[in-house]
Image: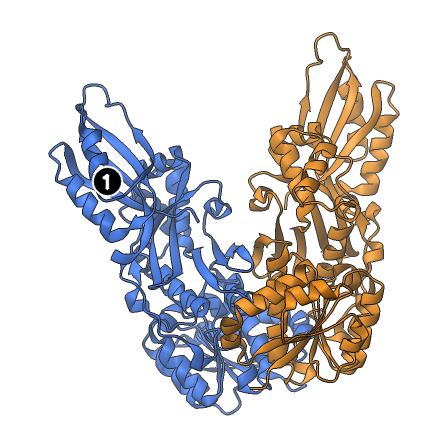
Chain colours: A orange, B blue
Amino acid sequence: MKPINVGLLGIGTVGGGTFTVLKRNEEEITRRAGRPIRITTVADKNLELARKVAGEGVRLTDDAFSVVTDPEIDIVVELIGGYGVARELVLKAIENGKHVVTANKALLAVHGNEIFSAAQKKGVMVAFEAAVAGGIPIIKALREGLTANRIQWLAGIINGTTNFILSEMRDKGLPFADVLKEAQALGYAEADPTFDIEGVDAAHKATIMSAIAFGIPMQFDKAYVEGITKLESADIEYAEQLGYRIKLLGIARKREAGVELRVHPTLIPTKRLIANVEGAMNAVLVQADAVGATLYYGKGAGAEPTASAVIADLVDITRLHTADPEHRVPHLAFQPDQVQDIAVLPIDEVETSYYLRMRVEDKPGVLADITRILADSEISIDAMIQKEPAEGEAQTDIIMLTHLTVERNANAAIARIESLPVVQGKVKRIRLENL
Amino acid sequence: MKPINVGLLGIGTVGGGTFTVLKRNEEEITRRAGRPIRITTVADKNLELARKVAGEGVRLTDDAFSVVTDPEIDIVVELIGGYGVARELVLKAIENGKHVVTANKALLAVHGNEIFSAAQKKGVMVAFEAAVAGGIPIIKALREGLTANRIQWLAGIINGTTNFILSEMRDKGLPFADVLKEAQALGYAEADPTFDIEGVDAAHKATIMSAIAFGIPMQFDKAYVEGITKLESADIEYAEQLGYRIKLLGIARKREAGVELRVHPTLIPTKRLIANVEGAMNAVLVQADAVGATLYYGKGAGAEPTASAVIADLVDITRLHTADPEHRVPHLAFQPDQVQDIAVLPIDEVETSYYLRMRVEDKPGVLADITRILADSEISIDAMIQKEPAEGEAQTDIIMLTHLTVERNANAAIARIESLPVVQGKVKRIRLENL
């Protein structure tokens, strides 16, 4: 059969990996796909690098727009990243009737609705397995594998940089800043790590998963995003003592009133499988009504794991491009006219449990005052540690785990606790999910 | 769009679950699939049960053959089980141009080659996500999600009954026979548990996964199958002391010389995620060249988890049935003319590590004799425990973990060790995989 011609935009880490894997496993992939898949054109500003990676027999250009309008190209793979030129190129490729594969989670989380709507009109596919959790086929699992289910919630460790940092903080008892430097030296964190450590990258991915899990539009602007920069080693240790591990989770949960979409450090019971996902690995736990809980684990980043997802999309498109568009897998798992306008809830309305750490004077009645405030707010306590004050100190730490409550409620109680004269400074608050 | 008409053969546990989930989530499933999927006919010997589960508006019959020849039926779901009438019905359905969904691992592992070949000739699909690991979309992951990869090996906890028994033996220190009775009382084991506890069920599933992972025919008759009936609590405890957990694994590994396909109790390092899969849960770990290790975890049995997989297949077929057959996902992941005749290796040629436990006289020189035999066979020792003899006893246990060796080699060394006069009885041998 006639080969499928692919135009590759951007030959950085993932682009290079895609080239390598497609070449190394050419025979295996063709035996599966039934026809050859060939990268015939590569666009990159760095033509020298492109030449080195792509070798002979591939057209090279520094003009990506010439690729997305090239009538010889069947599928465009966008690996440039960012919202700017990537958005223009993807829309132009769609306009020219090309299928698109992208690993660009920022682009989809922010401009996905516009892109999918354009693709729908043109009858082309936009595939994005590589945008979430690297090589783990989580998009396929959510969109096709669990298609019989009402998905209730999902929770994912979907940023390797922050999971590596949290694992190291716990293992070595080191503060955040030191471990971040180590992660940068090892290549697990970028020179400017803001998007990772502030939770933005995880929120992009959680937004994409929420859309295909619940059949709702991308609503990245409504997501609650809190990173790991303020986590202290002391809290990681206290959590361990209470039988919990702290992970940066991306959570999407469907409730009567709307959808919760949030990224924040979260205590999880240590006995849960997902609590034991360490280092730069990723995992997504999905709770659905028929199948129950399923978990998907693997490498969430890197040249070849991400290339694995890009190529899986290339093969899917190769298979489906002759099918009539109505019978293809819909971009957001649900048919375009069936996507529902369910709002993301403000963080105030989220329901979760809490880990609370407060510094108090070691006096009788302090605990009574605090528990009274919580009881008044109908927040019940699940576990507590009260430390003996250190030698010669008049203050000590109280650590509490609460049962489920609404965040607005918890905030009000915390404000009242902070106003007690015996409580020093702010109450440290980390959310807790039993999963 | 016109609904897809489904004929259901067998309305037992999974059939009932399929009915329930399809009805409960009808709206959600139709929003995804783009057209209604309706069970219009149910065949079961027990018409009274069928009536109770299916309710009004569904044609009931005790003649399954009338369903597979009914021109109104688009897809036949076979949930009868076994190799006998199920095989005839599936082949007859194919002959009549119907797509087939089945959860029948025994049928596919034993007669899969014949069935897929018949389906290929007729241009129909046979889907079987429910045949392996219940609701976990592992068939889809192997066949589509990891399509860019050369799969190197996979190892799965793919039988919930035996995993439940092993978890209980470890937790409670009880012998196999007691825990089996408990499992039967709880409904985790059948009245005749042979297929589960002897490893046959796991071998059916491992056979199916080996075929789609490597693009080879089903070769169930070549699989090595060893169950858990001879496992002793002492070995579970010694394994724990050495940092390992014992699981019944189904393993498929591609080697230069052929494919290893084997089911047996296996020591796995406790720190591996898969070692922590407890109770009746299933998990499959896949090692592939581009993506690295990925793991898939969830419920491997039960009415609704299995129904989740059956319905995912129904939706897939609904989507693909209008595509030309060349562009569908091939039954064995590879195009039919690309399935390779790679032989399954005899167990003698398998490469693995070993846990060895032997009862010896507590005399000087015993250990030297044993280690000399292992050294002669070029088997190196990774770890060892020599117990102090119990008060008043002249004998003691030696436990050894070896590095990788060929099974034939290990067998020869074990025979020589057993022939030493200071060694009592047989050497207990359990295979070990570092994964």
- Name the image quarter holding residue B313: bottom right
Is residue A170 in view from this perspective? yes
Residue drawn at point x = 15 percent, y = 35 percent? B424
How many marks on residues? 1
Seen from the viewer's position, the closer of residues B337 and B180 is B337
Residue B402, horizontal then vertical, whole percent: 32, 41
Tell me the subunit letter for badge 1. Answer: B
Q: Is residue B299 above or below residue A18?
A: above
Residue drawn at point x = 36 percent, y = 71 percent? B218
- Residue extending farthest to the left is B421
Seen from the viewer's position, the closer of residues B294 and B321 is B294
Which residue matches tag 1?
B374
- Name the image quarter holding residue A49: bottom right
Residue drawn at point x = 65 percent, y = 87 percent? B2
Residue B411, horizontal then vertical, whole percent: 21, 49
Q: Secondary structure at mark 1?
A: helix
Left or right, A111 with reference to A144: right
Q: Is residue B207 above or below residue B339?
A: above
Q: Is residue A148 above or below residue B422?
A: below
- Name the image quarter holding residue B261: bottom left
